[in-house]
Image (cartoon, coloured by chain):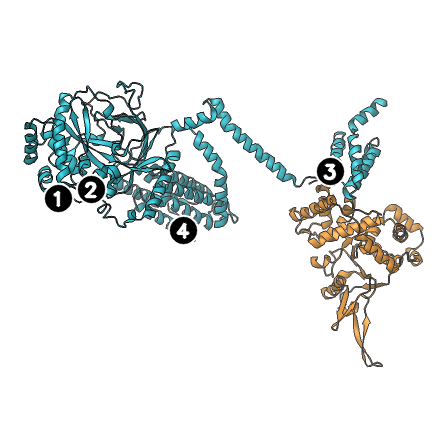
Amino acid sequence: MSAATSQLQSLLPRESLLWIFAAQLVVLLPHTMHLPIWLLGAWAVAVYWRLEVFRGRRETPGRLAKLVAVSLVVAGLVLTYRRWFALEPMVALLAVSFTLKNIELVSRRDALLSLMLAYFLAATLFVFEQTIPYALYGIVCVVIITAALVAQQGRGSARPGRALGLSTKLLAQSVPVMLVLFVVIPRLGPLWAVPQNTKAASTGISDSMSPGDFSELSKSDKPALRISFDGALPPPEQRYWRGLVYTHFDGRRWSEPGAADGYPRWGRGRSNRRPFGDTSGDDRALPAVGPRYRYQIIQEASHNPWLFALARPNSETRGVRETGDDTLVYRTPVGTRLAYDVRSWPRESVGEGEVLSGSEQRRHLQLPASGNPRARAWAKARFEEGMDGEAISGALLSLYNRNFTYTLKPPALGADTVDEFLFTTRQGFCEHFASSYVFTMRAAGVPARVVAGYQGGEWVDQQGYLLVRQYDAHAWAEIWLPGRGWVRVDPTASVAPERIRDGLQSAAAEEFMQDAFLPLHKIAFVTRLRLQWDMINYRWYQTVVSFDNERQEGILRRLLGEISPLRMALFMGVPMVAALLLLLLWLKLSGRGPSLPVASRLYLRFCRRMARAGLPRNPGEAPGDYARRIERELPRLGPMAVRITRAYEKAAYGSDMLAEKQLRRLVRGFWPLRHTRQAQAQT
Amino acid sequence: MQKIISAIVADIGKVLLGKEHQVKLALACLLARGHLLIEDLPGMGKTTLAHALAQVLGLSYKRVQFTSDMLPADILGVSIFERESGQFRFHEGPVFSQLLLADEINRSSPKTQSALLEAMEERQVSIDGETRPLPEPFFVIATQNPLQQSGTFVLPESQLDRFLMRISLGYPTRDAERALFQGVDPRAQLAQIKPRINTEGLRKLQSLVGQVKASDSLLDYLERLVQHTRQSPECGVGLSPRGALALLHAARAWALIHNRGHLLPEDLQAVLPSVAGHRLQSDGTDGTQLVERMMHQVDIIAA
């Protein structure tokens, strides 16, 4: 019986339950983007059950029911994911336990547990997304969860306005602390690596190129890279962001074996292999002269390991390394936004005296055994005319220049793609040009390769960065010239130079983004708005998301001079102590009410001195009564006390200015302790 | 002026031995144009005090003994048809006097009680659609036996509020009682009291009350007292603004009696139990005790 009553007393009231459910719903909603949708259904069932229990229509589920529910849900997870040790199943597990807790949500303790879990679950959202909308949503979550916590206090605290108001106030007060912690808390690397979901569709440049790939990309205006420069900016025709090199051609598709895995085997190319993160043991001497570009690239999630940079890059960012193909890769597929710093030496300034090894030569001359006979014949003819690599390239480019059209919608190609493109359709996109160019150069015995990446970008002046979008994706070629090394050749440039100079939008004005549901890119205002939004995003990423150890140290060093435990302690402690002192002061001042009139202050001084002499005034004792008591108990001080009291009464209650002066004089000369001591000495 | 006041107090003191404080309170109440409720056991001198006050102030005095079968007309008066003149003539009730002693007010029915209390508040009587002003000054001294007596109708709080002060006389001191035994019969003394002041003089005294100055420091103290009654969990109901004003006014009268042109905290403290005691009754506890405790808790000089 007693147990039953105690349980009844601790039962959650209706408002508390509703608040908890609201907080749960708010937290779970965005997770449905990543987690199986049936989770929300499970949650709804649990909530319904709990409400039925609240109405008294159903019993709280027994052990068997709970067991069944748990096994159902776990089975659901297993069936959905089929593997355990990845991020999403783990978050899903957390969400599921959070959901199931509802059916045994009985006491206040359970409510608090559920809400604390809600905070945690809200935080896991940022594992998936760290953009501004999610951050704002995260704030909303925290406000609502805190309001739900507030609502647990009972006594009208559950009223929505009051709970939300208090919660907002609390959180607003915590903002300074949050900022300090944001700056100060050490950025630890992850203690354990949770595999991210690699099934997510990769976006952008893929590890192979077949006809049509790039025209697909040209339909997307999503940002791909944001690049900020430290110093000089390369001119537009130099802005080739190299991502991937394709060396293997199977007659239709260009690809790079091993590229998708981040080049696990390093049996080729220049031996510049070095361990991840090791920046000291750099065995390749970096050229000390020449125009060098320093820039930071913020890359959107691509779910591919390759990174983008100008030719001859060097990066000291952790996890980034260079490949033998003069590109950069990351140690894992880029699952979230990634920022990396790069220095580049344009090829023109270096490269003399480099030799292509035999295996490299073979790799870059690889062609399928058969197919495209006309292109081969054309190349062979040029070769037999005695032309060197540069001359053949020139002849081919002038061929493009004379007869070819640049279009986003080329006609479909049959089996011999290069032949058909070169001699029949003669309409194409960068990939057609690059592919046919490299094929022909190889057929003529010149080592060549296709490079995929981005070209150009929109310079955002206000924030000073280059915005590269998916439709800036581009493919071009590089050929090996003895004595000059790898030389970039962009066959597209000889057909549509405006593509290189001004970007895709002007090169293919009519066709650009034709399939878009709404031709928003044609409205200047919307374009500007989008650019603004992109700038805000860029700022956000620059200041918040990419705030890592290094930046933290930078800021602290600027603030503190050096980073020592003492200074850190001071940096954190001093503001905290100052804030507490201010609070104390404020409490004291506000608690004291309006300041006292002069006469009262003088009289209080008199009272303090009397208290030291052993006769304190009681709070409710009127001055006259106090004087009489002094007369009675300390007759020696009596006359003086009476005079002071009279003067005080006149000053404070009769508004007599003269009496105030008299009071001041009297109190100044009134030292009861000395008085009594002298008196004792006399006796 | 001060002479007159001390003479008045001394004169009453001859009849009501050893009750100087209560006499002064009664006088202060009268000077502050308030009505007085005396609550005590029978035979403590309630009637004597009222009678002496009337005598010494030269007021017309009437006394009504309240009973349970009394009707409002018994107090207010009644219109009677006179045969010789052939019309109704209003016969004034006892309420048409300058000092009315309403003895044992809690014995009468609420109907009669409220008729009197209404007259006290309005200082006029409406009968048969005609409004008749009461004499000036008009002063009611009501007495009642302690509340827990059978056959009484307890005055509700709203009506208690009509009385500026509630005092009780209490037993006399030993010396006073001995003097009473030895001296002349108080009733005989009562007859010898001569008026010390006329109505005009009394009115002037009353107007002087308003001129007693209250400084900011004192008003601060008053405010603290009032706030304490409103915030302290001990008090069921706090002091109303009317109650606070009554307190201030009574304290002024008290200061005048003590020949001061300004208020002192002592003045407030002196009248506080009588003025606030019956307004602060909270469940079971006697208001006077509450006030005593409050006086010790609220600091006079600073919060």
Q: Quadrant of residue A550?
A: top left
- Mark 3 lies on residue: A598
Q: Which hue belongs to chain B?
A: orange
Three-letter amino acid code of the residue under disc 2: Ser
Q: Nearer the viewer, mark 2 or mark 4?
A: 2
Q: Identify the mark at residue A51; answer none if there is no mark.
A: 4
The image position of residue A559, as x and y in percent, is 47, 27
The Cα–Cα distance between marks 1 and 3, rounded to whole angstroms, is 99 Å
Q: Earlier in the sequence, mark 3 or mark 4?
A: 4
Give the position of the C terminus of chain A as an image quadrant. Answer: top right
Camera-side residue: B267 or A632?
A: B267
Going 66% across and 49% down the picture, which residue do you hit?
Answer: B230
- Mark 1 lies on residue: A412
Q: Identify the mark at residue B147; answer none if there is no mark.
A: none
Q: Earlier in the sequence, mark 1 or mark 3?
A: 1
- Which chain letter matches label 3? A
Camera-side residue: B280 or A544?
A: A544
Circles 1 and 3: CB atoms closer than 8 Å = no
Three-letter amino acid code of the residue under disc 1: Ala
